[in-house]
Image: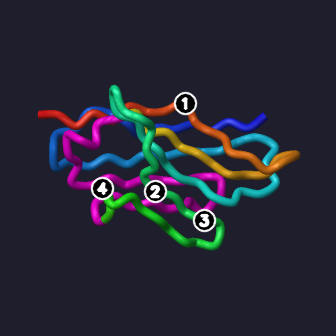
């Protein structure tokens, strides 16, 4: 069974920084894409950033230049460094992974709360 576990959320003032981490565990034979979505109260879940197996990186326009996604030395880990945070970044952040166990499918973490407020 595959699990994705996020950590690193919290409360930060506008202009501050946080770093989220996500670790995938289980009987994983290959990971293709890992990334992040977020969901603010009363809004739909939105894509934030992802990083592909070959190293290609993509960002939503709303976070470009402020957020940086990266993979750890172990390919089952992904990070999201968030700088210059704004109140509109407040949301639950979910890690996802497109990976192969017996079949190829996507998995999600349980989410970590990020609150940007003074």
Label 4: element kind: loop
Query: Disc 2 or disc 1, which is closer to the eye?
Result: 2
Above or below, comparing residue 11 to residue 57 in the picture: above
Q: Where is residue 64 in the image (x, y as percent from the top left)?
A: 32, 63
Label 2: element kind: strand
Q: How crowded is mark 1: few (under 14 residues within 10 Å), some or many (20 or more)?
A: some
- The mark nearer the N terminus, 4 or 2, is 2
Marks 4 and 3, how far apart in space?
A: 20 Å
- The mark nearer the N terminus, 1 or 4, is 4
Colouring of the image: rainbow
User: Disc count in the image?
Assistant: 4
Above or below, comparing residue 39 to residue 41 in the picture: below
For disc 2, the marked residue is 49
Answer with the quarter of the image where residue 33 lies. bottom right
For disc 4, the marked residue is 62
The answer to whether mark 1 and mark 3 are in CB contact below 8 A is no
Q: What number is the disc on residue 110?
A: 1
Label 1: element kind: loop
Q: In this view, does 117 lie to the left or right of 21?
A: left
The answer to whether mark 1 and mark 4 are in CB contact below 8 A is no
For disc 3, the marked residue is 52
Q: Residue at x 20, y 48 (%)?
A: 16
Marks 2 and 3, how far apart in space?
A: 10 Å
The answer to whether mark 4 and mark 2 are in CB contact below 8 A is no
């Amino acid at each position: 069974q595959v699990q994705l576990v996020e950590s690193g959320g919290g409360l930060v003032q506008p202009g501050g920084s946080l770093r989220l981490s996500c670790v995938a565990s289980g009987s994983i034979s290959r990971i293709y894409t890992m990334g992040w979505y977020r969901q603010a109260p009363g809004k739909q879940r939105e894509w934030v950033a992802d990083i592909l197996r070959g190293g290609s990186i993509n960002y939503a326009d709303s976070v470009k230049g402020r957020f940086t996604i990266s993979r750890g030395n172990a390919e089952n880990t992904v990070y999201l460094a968030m700088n210059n945070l704004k109140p509109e970044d407040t949301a639950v952040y979910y890690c996802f992974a497109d990976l192969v166990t017996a079949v190829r499918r996507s998995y999600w973490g349980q989410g970590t709360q990020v609150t940007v407020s003074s």
